């Protein structure tokens, strides 16, 4: 079963750049470490060699996972998204009904979520609760500490 991931142009470029960095630079670096450790003699008692081989295995696993993500990546066409309701790539301004605090989040795919940049995943409790809502609607969102009511103040792209 394939696990399709959706990306913005920015997110897909970031993923491609990371994969290139790992393949072009990190692989060569680890190969040099293995060669240097091998030159030091007996491999059966060489901790540096074992550590370099383990790092190589972890790197190859990471590369393999990124390649799988890339193979199943789909680019989101922002021009086809409905801007009247909260969807992926929507910038949503919400107001917490209980305390009046106002926050603005951009709804993104899970792999592009970054809370520091106010980007939350559509798979997060708040993201799921906001999907499909229109301006003025109230979203009852279940979070680990209970249920929070948010009013959708504004939706933009």
Image (cartoon, rainbow, N blue to C red):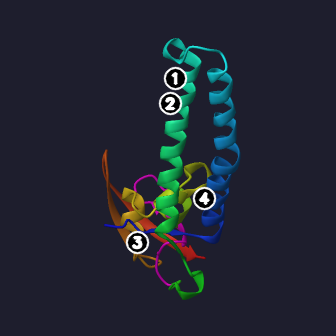
Q: Which residue is mark 3?
A: 131
Which is in the foreground here, disc 3 or disc 4? Answer: 4
Which is in the foreground here, disc 2 or disc 4? Answer: 2
104 shown above or below 24: below
Are there few (<14), some (14-19), or many (20+) residues within 10 Å of tag 4?
many
| Gap in angstroms between the C-alphas marked 3 and 4 | 25 Å
Tags 2 and 1 touching, CB below 8 Å = yes
State the SS at label 1. helix
In primary-sequence order, the first of circles 2 and 4 is: 4
Residue drawn where x is 53% and y is 30% of the image: 53
Which is in the foreground here, disc 3 or disc 1? Answer: 1
Query: Which segment is the magenta one?
Result: 84-101
In which quadrant is the C terminus drawn?
bottom right
In primary-sequence order, the first of circles 4 and 1 is: 4
120 shown above or below 22: below
In primary-sequence order, the first of circles 3 and 1 is: 1
How many numbered marks appear?
Answer: 4
In primary-sequence order, the first of circles 3 and 4 is: 4
Q: Which residue is mark 1?
A: 50
Examine the rendering and report whether any part of residue 120 can be seen.
no
Examine the rendering and report whether any part of residue 96 can be seen.
yes
Q: Which residue is mark 4?
A: 15
x and y percent of residue 148 in the render? Answer: 35, 56
In primary-sequence order, the first of circles 2 and 3 is: 2
State the SS at label 3. loop
Residue drawn where x is 56% and y is 52% of the image: 114
């Amino acid at each position: 079963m394939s696990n399709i991931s959706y990306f913005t142009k920015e997110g897909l470029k970031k993923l491609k750049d990371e994969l290139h960095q790992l393949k072009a630079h990190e692989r060569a670096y680890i190969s040099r470490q293995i060669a240097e450790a091998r030159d030091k003699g007996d491999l059966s008692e060489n901790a540096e060699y074992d550590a370099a081989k383990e790092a190589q295995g972890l790197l190859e696993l990471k590369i393999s996972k990124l390649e799988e993500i890339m193979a199943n990546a789909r680019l989101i066409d922002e021009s086809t998204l409905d801007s009247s309701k909260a969807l992926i790539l929507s910038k949503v301004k919400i107001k917490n009904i209980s305390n009046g605090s106002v926050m603005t989040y951009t709804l993104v795919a899970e792999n592009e979520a970054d809370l520091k940049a106010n980007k939350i995943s559509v798979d997060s409790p708040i993201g799921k609760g906001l999907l499909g809502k229109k301006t003025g609607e109230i979203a009852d969102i279940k979070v680990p500490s209970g249920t929070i009511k948010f009013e959708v103040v504004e939706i933009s792209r």
